[in-house]
Image (cartoon, rainbow, N blue to C red):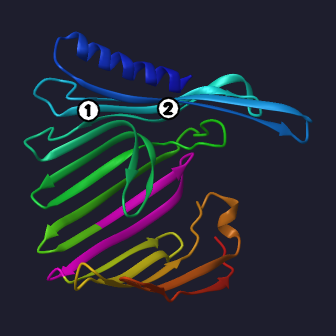
Amino acid sequence: MRARILLFLLVLVIAAATSSGYAVEIFGRATTEFAWWQDLIERDTKFAGYQYLRLGALDVFKDRDIAVFGYGRYGLNEAADPDANGRLYYLYMDWRDAWKDRLDLRLGRQWTNLVADSRIIDGAQVDCKIGPAGVVVLGGRDVIFDEFEEDTQSDDVTWGTEAYLRNVRNFNLSISYAEKYDEGDLARRIAAYDFGYTFKGLSRLYSESRYDIIGERISEALAGLKVFPSDRWTIRGEYFYAYPTFDYTSIYAVFAASRFHAGSLLWTTTSRIVFPFTGATRRRFSR
């Protein structure tokens, strides 16, 4: 029901904008999907059919860089529910340069992407920028999907912030922090950074890491060096480390987990040689 209402609102906003006589650029795509299979347990044939709809509108209001985007589906899956159901993936308003070319604003259901965390929220994202530097602040309802429908509970919320510096003498840096709450209880608290530096257009050093504050450990780390002395060949070496991070309100947080290590050396030219190595260690921990 929520998906149908919000998609209807998207169509209504676009229709209202176009009826004012102002030229609005509208685009979209519709995709229809049908599937059927033999259920080995119930020994009958199951059917599923979905209509996907992606819509967007640019320059919705005159003299304002405002766009609206939406994507969802509606249909029937006999294996899940005998009644039709819908799912809304995103529906948001994107307002660029909302204040003196220094503020971007997003409102609605949207995909957010910080170095510390990435997820879908029903909320707001504000990007305040001054030249190459800026600060992003976001927060809202944490949208959780199960196999067939939305599974968000009350007080499932998330928020985060990120400070960044982009393209300053070939240097980029982002530092971010994010928290997630499961029905009001703290589930995750992550701090992270990402940086890259290009040396005279011949090589690039980059690194990214996430730190689990609650568990007091590094949950993910990446470091690499890419050398490209010409357009014909490139040498890249990388090291990647990961340790599974679960919500601390989940039973999985007390289970044993394995660390993952991976490294690679890649030489790309008329031929390609890869030298991989991987490793893992296992340690039991408790909440």
Label count reads 2
Residue 36 appears in view: yes
Asked whether, in this view, residue 276 is left or right of residue 253, the answer is left
Q: Nearer the N terminus, badge 1 or badge 2?
A: 1
Residue at the image point whose x is 64% and y is 43% from the top:
146
Say which residue label 2 marks.
Answer: 72
- Viewer-side residue, 64 vs 117: 64
Amino acid of disc 2? Gly
Pointer 1: what residue? 67
Left or right: 143 as drawn, with respect to 44: left
> What is the magenta segment's predominant secondary structure?
strand
Which quarter of the rendered picture does the N terminus lie within?
A: top right
Residue 179 part of the magenta segment: yes
Q: Taking 137 as reference, is 53 left or right? A: right
Q: Position of residue 258 (x, y in %)?
A: 64, 79
Q: Residues within 10 Å of mark 1 (few under 14, many from 20)?
A: many
Between 120 and 163, the one nearer to me in the picture:
120
Image: magenta residue range: 175-201
